[in-house]
Amino acid sequence: MPDERRLGLETELRHSVLHKVRRGLRLWWRGEASLRRVVNAGLCNLSLRWRLARVLGKPYFLMIEPTNACNLRCPLCPTGRGTLGRKTTFLSLGVYRKCIDELAPYLIEVNVSNYGEPMMHRDLPEMIAYAKATGSRVAIGCNAHFLNEESSRKLIESGLDQVYISFDGLDQETYEKYRVRGDFRRVVEGVKALLAQRTALHRTNPFVELQFLVMKHNEGQIDAFRAMADEIGADRRIIKPVSFNVADWDDPDTRKAYGEFFPDTEDYRVYRHEGGEWHWKKEQLAFCTAPWRSLTVLADGGIVPCCRDPRGHYTMGNVADGVLKAWNGARFRAFRKSMVERRDRMPICKVCPGE
Ligand SMILES: C[S@@+](CC[C@H](N)C(=O)[O-])C[C@H]1O[C@@H](n2cnc3c(N)ncnc32)[C@H](O)[C@@H]1O
Ligand code: SF4
């Protein structure tokens, strides 16, 4: 029987330094991260605690976008809405390798996905294997449309540790309300193919998490989703309330579209809706830790502080010019300083619940 994670508003645990220290030591103890990586992560967390603009450690979590192209048109996703404002592109293997090479001694986890469908990149298994060879954990998030026997085998053989699969309905009708152009049967078959291949190859990885975005049209299906995820044999379920991208906070079209999707059940709402306005339920937005420990690389090699910047508003540099050069470069230092002193005036960050 798989367990379940509820993604939502509870961030206190993730923000506790003690929790991070314990997590680092656990990774080292289990042999999942070298002492050098754990010490580096510790330096990042010390820099965070002291709110240093120049971080003493190097980034240990990397999100890297193989492509910003997608087969689906999800109405609240900037890629799906066609509002990403970036040329549709595929990250070259050369740029990808350069990025991994620079960060290799420090990486604890790499997520090879961001805005777009990572499985549309033909070199994805090679990218995963390359990051795995550094000793880091590697994950992806995908919509499962390109999972079949062959692609699943390649993913498994690449050494992928974890896959998050968007699975937001129980039938074609509910699924395609949000996953526009999606084919629910392909999703189910894809997940089954991945799990069957994993068994056939006598592997335990990747760990497969099925994620259910709770929305108005599917909130009555949560129990049925649980039963289906268990029947298919997923390792874990994720129940996640729908939200809209913080980069689109002031966009009237996104706000209007969100009105169609936000659930009636209070438990699954992340916002209060008052006077025609949306507000986070949390009274105070948590302090964001991302710029002290992680980086996101976009498909054109652009470097941004986190995955909540889909349009590259806070571009800090490009992989071609050096990842570590950007990490403590003037722009990144100024960005961290602003995060500490005047986050309330920073686009995106001022309404972000934090990482
Ligand atoms: C932008 S997608 C990219 C990966 C892949 N294409 C997918 O859909 O899973 C990254 C994550 O955002 C989630 N997501 C999409 N729309 C969302 C929304 N409105 N609220 C919360 N999460 C959302 C997806 O389910 C996925 O887990
Ligand atoms: S499948 Fe993922 S990337 Fe594509 S439009 Fe939907 S949420 Fe965005």
Image (cartoon, helix red, strand yellow):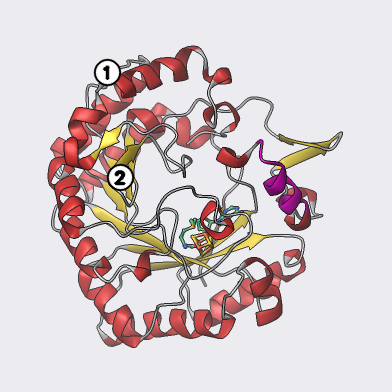
| Residue 262 sits above or below residue 24 on the image | below
Q: Is residue 38 above or below residue 332?
A: below
**For this view, does 201 lie left or right of residue 220?**
left
The residue tagged 1 is 54
Q: Position of residue 15 (x, y in %)?
A: 46, 31
Horizontal relation, residue 2 to residue 23: left or right: right
Q: Residue visible at 18% across and 48% down?
A: 100
Residue 355 visible in the snapshot: yes
Disc 2 target residue: 62
Expressed as whole percent of the image width and height from the top left, the position of residue 256 reads 76, 49
Q: Which residues are magenta?
A: 250-259
Is residue 171 in view from this perspective?
Answer: no
**Residue 324 in the image: x percent, y percent?**
19, 32
Q: Quadrant of residue 147?
A: bottom left
- Is residue 314 placed above or below 346 in the rendered structure? below
Nearest the viewer among 58 and 38 is: 58
Q: Can residue 252 be found in the magenta stretch?
A: yes
Q: Amino acid at mark 1?
A: Arg
Q: Is residue 13 left or right of residue 271?
A: left
